[in-house]
Amino acid sequence: MANLKIVQGDITKLKVDAIVNAANTALSGGGGVDGAIHRAAGPQLSEACLKLNGCPTGEAKVTPAFNLDAKIIIHTPGPIWHGGNRNEPTLLKNCYLNSLKRAVENNCKTVAFPSLSTGVYDYPLDQAAPIAVKTIREFDHPLDVQMVCFDEKTYNAYIAASKA
Ligand code: AR6
């Protein structure tokens, strides 16, 4: 079982083996945590992402972490919320699961996630948090995983999900 810790902070400042990025399917960079990770990692990250030819929603691809204090970045495009009837819960679960698999394949022991899909992609926090918590906790490898919540509202939602 993976061990889950919920913290509040900036994911780009963490010293962990793998940082997960809430990417888009083009892996072209953007706003939110994606923009922050690209700024902190440096311009080489865009070049590395371009070579990957995009990534389908729910899957996960790896690049080096360049100037970040991590070994790798795992890029996963979360689902855009359309009301919940377009397979959003399964796609969100797949983002967490496939990112954890990439971490294990790359011999990572410590992984940090942002709150996937709950920013620009509008996934309701109270529905996203339980999916994240359950998928991480049920993952059958001894990883140390941090959910890094940028704001207090997000932090409170993940704490509530972890206690439910
Ligand atoms: N550290 C941790 N979390 C952060 C940080 C940070 N430095 N900055 C923002 N967040 P979002 P999405 C939080 O919109 O909904 C991009 O343009 C933020 O407060 O970054 O999956 C991509 O290119 C929120 O709680 O990701 C895609 O097009 C969470 O990260 C699209 O946005 C996720 O918000 C992806 O949208």
Image (spheres, helix red, strand yellow):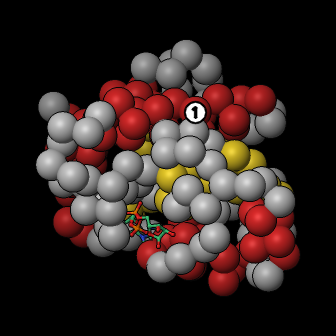
Dividing the image into four equal quarters, which quarter contains ligand 1?
A: bottom left
Q: Residue at x 35, y 30 (%)?
A: 90
Q: Does 6 appear above or below 140?
A: below
Left or right of 15, for residue 154: left
The amino acid beneath tag 1 is Asn
> Which of the 4 image quadrants contains residue 141?
top right
Q: Does 74 appear above or below 91?
A: below
Q: Residues within 10 Å of mark 1 (few under 14, many from 20)?
A: some
Left or right of 60, for residue 127: left
Q: Residue at x 38, y 40 (%)?
A: 92
> Which of the 4 image quadrants contains residue 133?
top left
Where is residue 28? Give x, y as percent. Answer: 63, 70
Question: Quadrant of the image for the C terminus?
Answer: top left
Q: Residue at x 83, y 60 (%)?
A: 51
Where is residue 138? Give x, y as percent. Answer: 43, 20
Left or right of 28, for residue 113: left
Q: Is residue 112 visible?
A: no
Q: Residue at x 58, y 33 (%)?
A: 98
Where is residue 135? Give x, y as percent. Answer: 40, 28
> Which of the 4 image quadrants contains residue 37?
bottom right
Residue of label 1? 98
Left or right of 95, for residue 21: right
Nearer to us in this view, 72 or 85: 85
Where is residue 112? Give x, y as percent. Answer: 56, 51
Q: Does 122 appear above or below 17?
A: below
Q: Does 124 appear above or below 160?
A: below
Q: Give the SS element for disc 1.
A: helix
Q: Is residue 64 visible?
A: yes
